Image (tube, coloured by chain):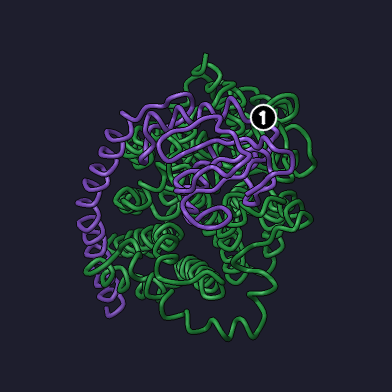
Amino acid sequence: MTILMTLIAGVVWVGAGRGLVRLVGGNRLGLSPLPLVAAWLLSGVAAGAFVTSVLAATGLPVRPWPLSAPLLILLAVAGGRPAAGSVRGRPWRKATISDLPSVLAAILAIPLVLAAASRLTTGNDEYAIWAFKAKVLLAVGRVDPFILAGDPAYTYANRDYPLLIPSIQVWLEGWIGHADDRLDHFAVAFIVAAGFVLVTALVGRLAGPLAAVLSVLGIASMTALATNATQFVGDATNCMFALVLLLLLAIGCTTATAEGNAAIRLAIPFAAGAAMTKNEGGAFVLALLIAAAVVIDSRRRRSLALPLAAAVVGLLPWTLWSRTHGLKNIFVNTSTLKPSSFAHNLHNVGPVLGQMTKYWIGPSGLAAVAVGAVLVAGLARAETRRTLLFLLLAIGLALGALLFTYVVSPLQGIGFLTSNIPRVIVFPSAAAWVIGSIAAAWAVKLLRPNADRSLPVEPEMTLTDSQ
Amino acid sequence: MRTILLKRLVGLLGVLAAVALAVSSIPNIGTTGDQLSHIRISHSSQQVLDGVPLAGGTTRADAEFYAAALRILPKDAAYHLAVGPGPGCGRNILKFFGVAYLLLPRAAVCDTKPAYWVLVGTGSTPPVGYQVLASAPGSVLLKRTIPGGSE
């Protein structure tokens, strides 16, 4: 029964995601079947998180029934039926050799999902921050203002954090009708794995199969990211939502075609998803959208308002609820942003930078030198300059946001930084790997005859989503 | 001619970068696999007793104690929780959150007004006017028997 209910919960997520993607116009990007389903799953999880946030903030029941499940099913139905004459039943026949890197990503993610599925909720952050909120919401059936806001004993439980990760537990355990730590861990890892598949497909779309393979190898080699993804915490999930957003904006900002517009539309659920996963996610979304606004053609800049609005709307319910109940962000708030406090904390720049460097996850040594050289070379070429500028600006702003957060934070000390930086640095680190892979692949293309005409790489429209 | 040479040079740098990325990442994929395998093996054997994971130093006696607390404490009750020696909630804040999580949705509070107390590793003896409802080595669940009584 548990397996059947889990499958139903997963199908509703995917269906709702498909509906959302189609409603916002992201289906016109023409992803292949595997990454397309991954995009639907992540979008469905984001939609579920938003529904949970709205229900929690309004004091309504948050379990799947009577409201969440009908709302997500409604979203799935709103996405419409498959178009007449569409490819149905055998979508894999439309897969091409360019999908192999995504398949490789899926295969490499299997050990991650298996490891996660063995875990119980025994980690400090798991039970103190993430599963804590889910358990309260599930047990009470709706928000409990005393535990989730009033009780000072939970001051350091980051109760202001958005609800995407807790909503996963609320959704799944609500369907199966009992607690299941291993299922919760499996779900988070599976979502990360789906993000990995989608990231790989988007890298391939942007820079070809070589970049996609290098990106797969790089991300799969990030032990810290993989072990984090086995836990019921938000960093790996946040990393994947943000990476997908980064790549969709890279495609969208530099391609003034229907494909580019569709990429920006598909960015809508991912901007919301990243913002609803962690407070850093909101900072990353802002950093990526600012970078996009700098490089995008001024006539298309307005289109970025949609992913920005999605992130704001996604954050709004729980932020309003927590602020009206006296909760505040313990890192960045009116006290820590005071000029006097900021000036007082400036001496933290050195230690925070030191920890960010120490826990940076590749590339290092020879790889860093080679990638740096290719990046410089890539920036010198008009065909790829804008995309690389966007990617570098985005990662620079994201790192700046992290640095700022930890410099102004009232919590300091090596112990605190050591327990935080290795987790939050996974997104910039993974983004750096991806950017290095893209730059290297673009540079390799220069060895081809007629290289000028092959840059920045042909999009491969393998399947127009008409399912 | 110079442009073509420059392109070739950048292209070769790209090849070098691609090789460097692949070479520096592949060995770590093995390390990642080993770590994941270790996590799977070490966690698969962890058992759950009455909803309490037997992990992180939690013994069977501890689990039985928490299970008893779950049965005894009313679901909508607030209870005083102290973990580790020290005033208020005690000094072991990480374990505090662990115990508080197990006993949710009952609200753990630091003040001593509630009728129910859960003391874990505090090293203190039960105060006068409190009845022991359940216990395990180092842990005790108390209920106030004198109206208005406290420490």
Q: How many marks can you see?
A: 1
Residue A319: which quarter of the image? Answer: bottom right
Residue at 58 percent across and 25 percent down: it is B71
Q: Quadrant of the C terminus of chain A?
A: top right
Depth check: A329 or A83 in front? A329
| Above or below: residue B118 compared with residue A308 | above
Residue at 78 percent across and 35 percent down: it is A60
| Above or below: residue B99 compared with residue A277 | above
In percent of width and height, residue A420 lies at 45, 61
Q: Can residue A27 be seen? A: no
In percent of width and height, residue A142 lies at 73, 35
Apparent colour of chain B:
purple
Taking the image as shown, residue A174 lies to the left or right of residue A241, namely: right
Q: Can residue A411 be seen? A: yes
Depth check: A145 or B109 in front? B109
As drawn, the chain in green is A
- The residue carrying mark 1 is B74
In percent of width and height, residue B113 lies at 69, 47
Farthest top residue?
A1
Query: Crowdedness of circle 1 by 10 Å Cα count: few (<14), some, many (20+)?
Result: few
Name the subunit of mark 1: B
Taking the image as shown, residue A69 lies to the left or right of residue A403, namely: right
Residue at 72 percent across and 53 percent down: it is A322
SS type, badge 1 = loop
In percent of width and height, residue A90 lies at 47, 21
